[in-house]
Image (cartoon, rainbow, N blue to C red):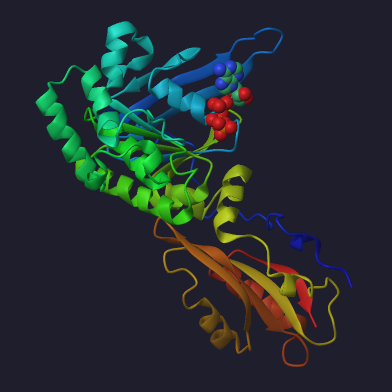
């Protein structure tokens, strides 16, 4: 008895044609963009015998004003390079980066420093000064910006309250938890009232519960202050929980971009599909996978996997299928999640073989699913 080849753990399920195709297109028009990448490439030159690296190529997209946009990619995809172009720490090799209607790539010296005040940034390892209290860390950008002492004191108190750690005013970083340190980092990033907040893997060092709390805080900040948030991450869970828009980077190129719900309901690029698989899983429970064979047994069930995509999709599908075709359909496994308000996942159904059904029942089931535009595939049989 052979296990069906498509059931190898971690192997992507058979691809289906996207029902609603989406082109890779700028996520926002020029006028409502907070950040615009125009014809960007970034090449790090060869150095001491090491070859040059084309870190970014043909980057053209816009980040909508007021949005929470996730930039997701595997290690080395070019995420950090992209973020360093937004805050002017790097210059593009070609093209320009326009932030809040200013070409940041053309600025230098004092003009660049002034522009950088409207771009806050938070980091994976918080980057706090250990010799300064929470309040003094938050005060730092205000001191650099030349604020009066009394104004700094008032603003710091306001920020500590905003991020929910008013009681940690005099604590040093070593006395704070990871989540509290990141709250200080967020308060410091917001001190000069930036219009953009860049988050570079800001929750990667935190446990899931603290991650959730920090992402909730960022969502509140976006909602209440209207700050555009750019999330750099390799974690699908971060994009799924917080982002409204997403840009998928692979090997220095944008491979898909748009609304999270659209991109992850019908992911087209293998990288995007692999990120989705992290959330919904694409493998069957081992106890089921180990029983599936490719040869039809005399009795048992055909195993059919059905993709479920879209708001409310699949809610009544199994009941309707069973009723309309008069079959005893079994639900062998199910994995459905919600991304951007859309259901994404799959159901694995058992269709009875034998006298009443046989191959005919499987064929009728696949035809019925196709008629209602549920992408489906037969994985094999269980005895
Ligand atoms: N200063 C640099 N000099 C030379 N090459 C660099 C430099 N910074 C990045 N690179 C290279 O550019 C490519 C993209 O790197 P980048 O750090 O932007 O990716 P990333 O998606 O942020 O990766 P990670 O998640 O691992 O940080 C990689 O091949 C990297 O080695």
Judged from this view, the residue extending furthest toward the left is 150
Ligand 1's image quarter is top right
Q: Which is nearer the eye, 350 or 179?
A: 179
Q: Report how many numbered discs are placed on residues in the image.
A: 0
Query: Would you say 279 lies left or right of 29 here?
Result: right
Residue 112 location, x and y as percent? 31, 13
Judged from this view, the residue extending furthest toward the right is 1
Residue 213 location, x and y as percent? 36, 53
Which residue appears at 80% of the width and 83% of the height? 383
Which quadrant of the rendered structure holds the N terminus? Answer: bottom right
Rendered position, 12 above or below 187: below
Rendered position, 1 above or below 57: below
Q: Which is nearer the eye, 231 or 350?
A: 231
Residue 197 location, x and y as percent? 33, 33
Query: Would you say 290 lies left or right of 20 here?
Result: right
Q: Which is nearer the eye, 198 or 294?
A: 198
Which residue appears at 12% of the width and 34% of the height? 154
Asked whether residue 149 appears in the rendered view, the answer is yes
Asked whether residue 253 appears in the rendered view, the answer is no
Which residue appears at 40% of the width and 46% of the height? 177
Residue 98 location, x and y as percent? 34, 21
Query: Would you say 221 lies left or right of 87 here?
Result: left
Which residue appears at 28% of the width and 8% of the height? 110
Judged from this view, the residue extending furthest toward the bottom is 355
Q: Which is nearer the eye, 130 or 229?
A: 130
């Amino acid at each position: 008895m052979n296990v069906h080849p498509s059931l190898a753990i971690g192997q992507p399920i058979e691809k289906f044609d996207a029902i609603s195709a989406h082109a890779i297109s700028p996520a926002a028009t020029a006028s409502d963009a907070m950040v615009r990448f125009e014809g960007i490439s970034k090449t790090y030159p060869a150095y001491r015998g090491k070859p040059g690296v084309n870190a970014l190529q043909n980057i053209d997209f816009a980040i909508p004003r007021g949005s929470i946009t996730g930039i997701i990619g595997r290690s080395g995809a070019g995420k950090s390079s992209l973020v360093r172009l937004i805050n002017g720490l790097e210059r593009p090799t070609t093209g320009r980066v326009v932030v809040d209607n200013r070409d940041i790539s053309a600025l230098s010296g004092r003009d660049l420093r002034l522009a950088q005040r409207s771009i806050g940034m938070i980091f994976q390892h918080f980057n706090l000064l250990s010799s300064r209290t929470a309040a003094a860390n938050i005060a730092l950008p205000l001191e650099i910006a030349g604020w009066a002492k009394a104004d700094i004191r008032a603003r710091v108190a306001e920020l500590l309250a905003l991020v929910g750690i008013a009681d940690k005013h005099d604590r040093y970083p070593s006395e704070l938890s990871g989540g509290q340190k990141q709250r200080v980092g967020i308060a410091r990033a917001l001190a000069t009232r930036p219009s953009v907040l860049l988050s570079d893997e800001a929750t990667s060092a935190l446990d899931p519960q603290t991650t959730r709390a920090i992402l909730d805080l960022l969502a509140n900040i976006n909602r209440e202050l209207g700050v555009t948030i750019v999330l750099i991450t390799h974690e699908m869970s971060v994009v799924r929980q917080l982002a409204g828009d997403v840009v998928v980077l692979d090997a220095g190129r944008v491979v898909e971009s748009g609304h999270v719900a659209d991109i992850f309901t019908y992911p087209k690029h293998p990288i995007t599909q692999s990120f989705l698989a992290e959330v919904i899983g694409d493998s069957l429970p081992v106890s089921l996978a180990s029983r599936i064979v490719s040869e039809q047994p005399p009795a048992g069930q055909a195993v059919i996997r059905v993709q479920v995509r879209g708001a409310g999709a699949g809610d009544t599908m199994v009941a309707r299928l069973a009723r309309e075709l008069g079959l005893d359909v079994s639900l062998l496994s199910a994995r459905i999640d919600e991304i951007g308000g859309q259901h994404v996942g799959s159901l694995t159904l058992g269709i009875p073989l034998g006298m009443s059904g046989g191959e005919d029942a499987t064929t009728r089931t696949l035809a019925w699913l196709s008629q209602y535009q549920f992408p489906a595939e037969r994985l094999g049989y269980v005895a």
